[in-house]
Image: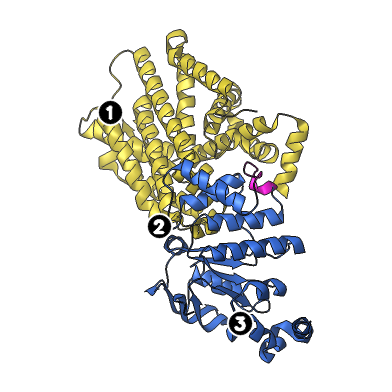
Amino acid sequence: MIRFQDHTYKILLLVAFLLCAIFPYVASGFWIRLLTGIFLYAVLAQGLNLIAGFTGYAAFGNMIFFGLGGYTVGILMVKTRFPFLPSLFAAAIVGIIVAILIGIPLLRLRGHYFALASLGAAEAVRQIMDNLTDLCGGAMGLTLPQMPGTPEQGNMAFYYLLFALLIVSFAATYFISRNRLGYALKAIKANEEAADAMGINTTYYKVVAWALSGLFTAMAGGISAYWYTFIEPATVFDVVVVVKLFVILLLGGAGTVMGPLYGAFIFEGISEIVWSRFLNLHLGILGILVILIVFFIPNGLIDMARRGFRLKTILDTIREERV
Amino acid sequence: MTREPILKGNNVSKLFGALKAVDNVDFTVYEGEILGIIGPNGAGKTTLLSVINGTLPISKGNLFFRGQEVTGLKPFQIAQRGISRTFQIVKPFPGMTALQNVAIGALFGRHPEKKMSRAMDKAAKTIKQVKLEGKEKILVEKLNVSERKRLELARALTQDPDILLLDEVMAGLTLREIEDIMALIKEVNRAGTTIMVIEHVMKAIMGISDRIIVLHHGQKIAEGPPAEISENQQVIAAYLGERYSRKAEERSHA
């Protein structure tokens, strides 16, 4: 049984951490970029995990924060010549503020209504960005300056930036899952009416969860924009990315601390190794993967690992989920 | 002994479109008492409880708790003032253990524990009080009906409520389990908690209540001590039936 508090598991995590820390010094550029991409997806999935996995609110509009984070960094660096790190800090603030502002009205909706409303909000923000030509290049996008130094140094810098953000986001989620906030979110996900009757101010806690989600997602967006040196509305507000994040969550285990990381590793691994050879079937394979995960491992790999990887366990899970 | 009113409802109504689920009900709950609410299915008992704790918004009327108006407050605000409830169809938090479920009661509500360790200790004590010891680490979805009812009671009790609203906590239980829950309710009441209880198990509600309110078609048709209620002709006709009345008479002669 895999548990976070298990001694062996902690040692394994430490070893993985050390390997990741020295990885850029022993691996080639391709592998560094691949792992950087995995870190990016893991952070985004963890951001989504806070609102969707822990709180049970399918925030299909989470790309709002990714896009706005990227645009905040882009606009500040291009238009005002701000250095990157203060721009990234500003992106984090923007992520929090926007999450609070749209969360207060939207998080009063439940279930499908919230999912659709958040998707609508993302589309609205995309349209606004499309039309803000003077400020952010409109649909043509915005080109950011390159990081000073050689491309290899740039690769390493983005690797460590996202690795640091990954550690911070996962550590934060670990502590949240074990304190009052985490208990409130789990109760809201399990039964919002009962949580409310228990004295939990559900709107407040949901907004806090989305603000944290907005924080990490916007920071990831900011780093990503500087990494790719280009940002455009069609890419950063793309709903397909959120669908991928949901697949990652489902795969690893929604509502678990480590699920997004395992999900991102597996998903991006599959994506890089297999999908790059089937570019035309990319979305089709994504759809099939969603169906297979929901059908066979609805609670994710962490839950499956806890129960044991056996055919009987898989069949039991399917039966339980259908009841 | 004169008791202070702790909860008061004036002309409380709850409308669902044209349907008057609760229709101009006046009630007073006195500190330290057990107030039973009975009535046929659809009489408005659960709706009244839901209106009191804010789960359903009140349509008309006013609610006062310890003299202060609480009309229109949200359920979490009502809980934070000291009114906790259980649900007719239990609503545990799946994916969490029994101890974690009960700890949520301690972490929020009127006297929220700031420290997780203290909340867990308090939850463990309450679990013992409702006789669920040994089940602390079990996921709630693995508990049986009786255990889930106790868990729900424990979750409300960890909040140290002034008033506990119990909605059919004995439904679906065996006779032995009902007796255990009755003893527990009395024990909680003796410790100072005022209780408002909805129940269909007549033996239980007549046995534990100090006073009873009878609802029928959303209206209050009677109020008084159990002995008086069991002889009220309107209540017999609307809910208890002649058979119950005869049995009650036989018991009083025995």
Residue B57 in percent (x, y) is at 48, 71
**Could you tell me the amino acid type at mark 3?**
Pro
Frontmost residue, A37 versus A4: A4
Q: Is residue B140 magenta?
A: yes
How many numbered marks are there?
A: 3
Q: Residue furthest left?
A: A80
Dot 3: chain letter:
B
B36 versus A31 height, above or below:
below
The residue depicted at 49 percent of the width and 37 percent of the height is A241
Frontmost residue, A203 versus B227: B227
Instruction: Kindly identify which residue carries mark 3.
Output: B225
**Could you tell me the amino acid type at mark 2?**
Pro
Same-chain check, marks 3 and 1:
no
The residue depicted at 20 percent of the width and 30 percent of the height is A81
Residue A18 in percent (x, y) is at 46, 15
What segment carries the magenta color?
B133-142
Instruction: Kindly identify which residue carries mark 2.
Output: A105
| Chain seen in yellow | A
What is the CA distance from the residue labelled 3 to the residue labelled 1?
Answer: 72 Å
The mark nearer the N terminus, 1 or 2, is: 1
Quadrant of the rendered image containing residue B63: bottom left
* Direction from residue A188 to residue B175 in the image, left or right: right
Instruction: Kindly identify which residue carries mark 1.
Output: A85
The numbered mark at residue B177 is none
The residue depicted at 53 percent of the width and 31 percent of the height is A258
Quadrant of the rendered image containing residue A312: top right
B221 versus A101 height, above or below:
below
Image quarter where the N terminus of chain A lies is top right
Residue A173 in percent (x, y) is at 46, 36
**Could you tell me the amino acid type at mark 1?**
Leu
Q: Colour of chain B?
A: blue
